[in-house]
């Protein structure tokens, strides 16, 4: 997150200017801690916009984003510590150091005992509370530790995580060493449960909608929404080579082991669909954690749900108005599912990773107020990651269900504009994918519950953004920011391989979308294009057969046909590849 020097040239030179930058960043952060209103913080940002050059303004804002996310993560961990320590009325933070059983790197037997307890199907699994360094450990202050809390046995022998606060058995283990052992243990376990990961680029509206609909339709899918440990891990990834020496391969093992642990924890809620749905915590985490999750779980299901930039800014603005800008966000109820979730106002509106390779962005973001600028950069970084991963599809096999919120919210028809209401068909398509039910019809009562939930949520969102609508001038400024990316087209365009609502849907576009009037019409071509590693933020000469009405067309080859068949919807392999 603090790599803004690379994206904004000359932001870290000059002593006096640097001191000014630190002063304004620290002052704004201090006001945020005091819980001052969003309006006042916007006024402070307005002063910064007048006195700082665009690159320095962006660097200052990114310092504020970093501070807010880090403080929110720490406060989130504190609330979880409180929850596993009998709750607000009983928890005593002064006893923290004594209540956690510490396991060291060389305590092999103790780690194996903990893993055996985790894999015991008759006992409830531990919850993930935090990932932290022990700076007071003189022998090893740089090692990160994983904090696990084991629920007390239930009187009815249930293995589900208790909702209300309880007194848990609390254990601290070395993060990297323990997760490697846990990963090997899970690799030795056979499982029939599929995982589905939802990545968001809609200020949280898309992932929340899909999670709530899946819960309401009650078709055997367990849900884990915005897990705070993924935010902890994203922060660690953003600090790679700065405050720790954890390698990419070790992060992959950590992700594998903790996802499998969390999925195992909710095994009591898995039903007929044999699926656990993970909603990644907000669009801000997507650039840091999605590439690793997709690499580790390449054969599992992936959904990328997105909305237009203007709609996402309106949604993000509504969240800020409802919850404020303070990092001290508390769960509405003191139950584990809510206490352990990252606050959506933080994970959806404060960027954690800068947009790559975009030197024009500081100038255009300087025209927006601080709140709009942060939401725009969060949204752009998420979409940029999607485009980058799709540009390497033939190497990483990233074939997600690309879900457009415009269809679900009754804003869009087939193609790039308004049309007939396709929301129920679009909802059915994405539910078939998440539940693995494409080859068999969803029960009538399941679809009825899903449609009812979507209708209710649509009304809620429309009411929430009513007082956060953008005017024409604001939309123009936002579109200028997005247009600096070169590969994200503005307006009602669709992302590459967006699933079109119809009965016989496909994860891959079977034919080109029609070009809009402002774009060059693409010519059909069945010729296979060469692999492209072009970065999502750079443009290149369009090739024959490329549809320029699709965002990312410059960054991704869309005219070719993959050598691999989509195993999620047809044969798991292509028989023609084995004729030699």
Image: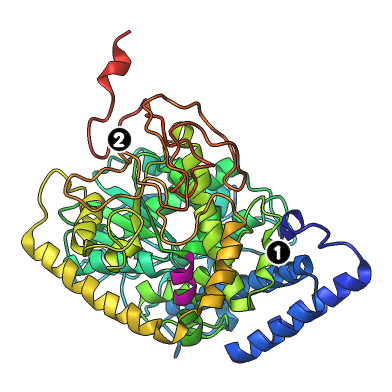
Q: Secondary structure at mark 2?
A: loop
Number of numbered discs present? Answer: 2
Please name the residue shown 37% across and 78% down the image.
166
Please tell me whether the stretch drawn in magenta is mainly helix, strand or loop. Answer: helix
Q: Which residues are magenta?
A: 309-314
Please name the residue shown 39% across and 62% down the image.
126
Residue 332 position within the rendered picture, expressed as x and y whole percent measured from the top left: 39, 84
The answer to whether 249 is drawn above or below residue 458 in the figure is above
Image position of 51 (left or right of 314): right
Image position of 19 (left or right of 382): right
Image position of 453 (left or right of 401): left
Please name the residue shown 44% across and 53% down the image.
258
- Residue position for label 2: 566
Return the residue nearer the eye: 436 or 426.
426
**View extreme (front): residue:** 517
- Residue position for label 1: 362
The answer to whether 333 is drawn above or below residue 539 in the figure is below
Q: Are marks 1 and 2 in contact (CB under 8 Å)?
A: no
Marks 1 and 2, the one that precedes in the sequence: 1
Name the image quarter holding residue 156: bottom left
Name the image quarter holding residue 19: bottom right
Residue 295 position within the rendered picture, expressed as x and y whole percent measured from the top left: 46, 41
**View extreme (right): residue:** 15
* Residue 493, numbered circle: none
Return the residue nearer the eye: 489 or 409.
489
Q: Secondary structure at mark 1?
A: helix
Residue 68 highlighted magenta (yes or no): no
Residue 128 position within the rendered picture, expressed as x and y whole percent measured from the top left: 45, 63
Name the image quarter holding residue 491: bottom left
User: Image quadrant for the N terminus?
Assistant: bottom right
Image position of 183 (left or right of 156): right
Residue 432 seen in this snapshot: yes
């Amino acid at each position: 997150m603090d790599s803004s020097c690379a994206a904004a040239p000359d932001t870290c030179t000059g002593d006096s200017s640097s001191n000014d930058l630190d002063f304004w960043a620290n002052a704004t952060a201090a006001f945020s801690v005091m819980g001052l209103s969003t309006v006042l913080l916007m006024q402070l940002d307005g002063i910064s916009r007048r006195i700082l050059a665009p690159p320095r303004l962006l660097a200052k804002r990114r310092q504020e984003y970093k501070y807010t996310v880090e403080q929110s993560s720490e406060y989130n961990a504190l609330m979880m510590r409180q929850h596993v320590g009998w709750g607000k009325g009983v928890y005593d933070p002064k006893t923290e150091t004594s209540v956690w059983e510490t396991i060291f790197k060389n305590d092999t037997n103790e780690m194996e005992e903990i893993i055996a307890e985790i894999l015991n199907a008759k006992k409830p699994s531990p919850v993930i509370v935090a990932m932290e360094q022990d700076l007071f450990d003189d022998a090893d202050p740089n090692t990160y530790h994983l904090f696990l809390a084991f629920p007390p046995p239930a009187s009815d022998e249930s293995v589900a995580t208790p909702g209300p606060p309880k007194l848990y058995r609390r254990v601290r283990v070395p993060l990297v060493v323990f997760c490697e052992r846990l990963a090997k243990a899970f690799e030795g376990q056979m499982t029939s449960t599929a995982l589905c990961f939802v990545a968001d680029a809609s200020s949280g509206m898309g992932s929340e909608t899909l999670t709530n609909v899946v819960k309401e339709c009650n078709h055997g899918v367990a849900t884990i929404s915005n897990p705070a440990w993924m935010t902890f891990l994203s922060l660690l990834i953003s600090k790679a080579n700065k405050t720790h020496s954890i390698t990419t391969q070790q992060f992959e093992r950590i992700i594998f082991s903790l996802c499998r642990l969390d999925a195992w924890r909710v095994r009591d809620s898995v039903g007929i669909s044999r699926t656990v749905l993970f909603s990644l915590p907000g669009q801000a985490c997507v650039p840091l954690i999605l590439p690793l999750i997709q690499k580790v779980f390449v054969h599992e299901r992936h959904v990328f749900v997105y909305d237009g930039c203007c709609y996402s800014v309106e949604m993000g603005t509504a969240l800020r108005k409802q919850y404020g800008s303070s990092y001290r966000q508390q769960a509405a109820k003191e139950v584990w599912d809510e206490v352990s979730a990252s606050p959506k106002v933080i994970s959806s509106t404060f960027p954690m990773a800068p947009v790559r390779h975009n030197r024009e962005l500081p100038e255009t973001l300087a025209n927006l107020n601080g709140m709009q600028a942060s939401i725009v950069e969060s949204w752009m970084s998420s979409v940029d990651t999607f485009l980058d991963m799709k540009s390497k599809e033939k190497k990483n096999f990233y074939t997600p269900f690309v879900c457009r919120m415009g269809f679900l919210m009754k804003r869009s028809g087939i193609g790039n504009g308004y049309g007939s209401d396709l929301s129920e068909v679009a909802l059915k398509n994405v539910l078939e994918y998440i539940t693995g039910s494409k080859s068999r019809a969803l029960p009538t009562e399941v679809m009825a519950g899903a449609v009812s939930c979507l209708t209710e949520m649509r009304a809620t969102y429309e009411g929430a953004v009513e007082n956060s609508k953008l005017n024409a001038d604001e939309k123009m400024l936002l579109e200028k920011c997005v247009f600096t990316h070169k590969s994200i087209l503005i307006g009602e365009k669709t992302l590459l391989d967006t699933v079109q609502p119809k009965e016989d849907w496909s994860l891959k576009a079977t034919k080109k979308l029609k070009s809009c009037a402002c774009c060059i019409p693409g010519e059909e071509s069945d010729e296979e294009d060469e692999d492209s590693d072009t970065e999502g933020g750079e443009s290149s000469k369009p090739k024959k057969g490329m549809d320029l009405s699709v965002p990312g067309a410059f960054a991704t080859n869309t005219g070719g046909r993959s050598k691999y068949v989509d195993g999620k919807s047809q044969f798991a392999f292509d028989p023609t590849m084995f004729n030699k």
